[in-house]
Structures are given as C-alpha cells and as structure tokens.
Image: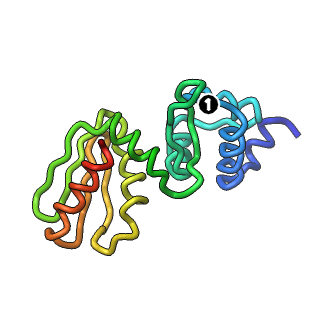
C-alpha cells in the first residue's frame, strides 16, 4: 500500500493516536516539525487540521531540558503547565458582573481557554469560556463568584 493510500484510509482517531505516539517518542517543538514527522509516517495534514488536533488532545508547549517541546498532559489539567502558560501569555485580566475577560498574547487564547475550561469545569458556578485569537470570555453563573475566579487566576499567574 502506498503512503497516499495509507493516508486516505487513516481516520481522525487513528491520526490523533499517531500524533500522541510521535509526541511521546520525539522532542517536537513546532507544528512544522510535527507535520514533517507525520509526513514521514505517510500522514499528510494541513496546519489548520493539525492545530485543531493538538487542541483536542490538550497538547501544550512546555520548557524541557531540550528547549520547548509539545507534551500531552497526563491528566486533563496539569497545574504547572497552566501556571507556566498563564505567566507567559496572559497580558491582562478584567471583569464585569459575571464575566471575566482574559487578554493574551496573539494566537494564545484558545490554548489558555482550553486549560481554564479543564481547571474550572468541576466548579458548579463555571459555565464555560469562549476564545478568539487573543481574548477569552469566561462566563460564570452569578456575579458573586467573579472575585473568587479572579483571585484563582491571579494566584496561578504568580
């Protein structure tokens, strides 16, 4: 079977498994490197699809002894990864009533929102978040919990 035939028969689940396998075996620090590693396996994917796959898998870029590298946290939320991400990319946090607005460096809002969603999803007052390119809107059930969320986010940034 040729690589192109193999690629056609690969479904999303199989592609995600292959991404996990590659990230566990190799020190990958960019989407371009990951695309090349997938290509070597006969898997051709465009950057937008790869970006969505990484988000779905909860992949984060973290410092290691080899520099930056993509990792898949063992649990849905890795506190040290969340803290590192918030320290590096969050520019400002503000609020209005039951809404919290988090500003990030461009291109980082979706990764931060994913981590925030996984961190706060066990709190009954947390509804969810919506992320753009550099802005996250966090929605809470009531305004009484806004200060608590702000304090938790600020504490994570320290």
Quadrant (top left, top right, bottom left, bottom right) of the N terminus: top right
Residue 100, x across and y down, in percent? 20, 55
Q: Residue, x 37% and y 54% (percent of image)? A: 116
Give the quadrant of residue 124.
bottom left
Residue 8 shown left or right of residue 132 in the figure: right
Residue 147: percent from the left, percent from the top? 16, 61
* Residue 137 relative to residue 72: left or right: left
Q: Taking 80 as reference, is 127 above or below it?
A: below
Instruction: Please provide percent x and percent y for residue 20.
Output: 66, 46
Disc tally is 1
Q: Classify 20 as above or below 137.
A: above
Front residue (pair 77, 7): 77
Question: Residue 152 location, x and y as percent?
Answer: 28, 56
Which residue bears the numbered disc 1? Answer: 28
Q: Residue at coordinates 55% horizontally, 57% vertically from top-left?
A: 75
Q: Residue at x 30, y 43 (%)?
A: 157
Q: Is residue 72 left or right of residue 95?
A: right
């Amino acid at each position: 079977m040729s690589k192109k035939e193999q690629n056609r028969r690969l479904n999303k689940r199989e592609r995600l498994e292959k991404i996990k396998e590659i990230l566990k075996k190799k020190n990958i620090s960019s989407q371009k490197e990951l695309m090349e590693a997938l290509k070597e396996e006969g898997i051709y994917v465009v950057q937008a699809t790869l970006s969505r796959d990484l988000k779905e898998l909860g992949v984060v870029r973290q410092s290691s002894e080899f520099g930056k590298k993509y990792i898949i946290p063992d649990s849905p939320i890795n506190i040290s990864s969340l803290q590192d991400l918030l320290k590096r990319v969050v520019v400002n946090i503000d609020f209005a009533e039951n809404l919290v607005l988090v500003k990030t460096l461009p291109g980082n809002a979706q990764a931060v929102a994913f981590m925030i969603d996984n961190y706060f999803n066990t709190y009954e007052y947390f509804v969810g978040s919506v992320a753009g390119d550099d802005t996250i809107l966090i929605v809470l059930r009531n305004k009484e919990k806004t200060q608590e969320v702000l304090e938790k986010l600020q504490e994570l940034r320290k």
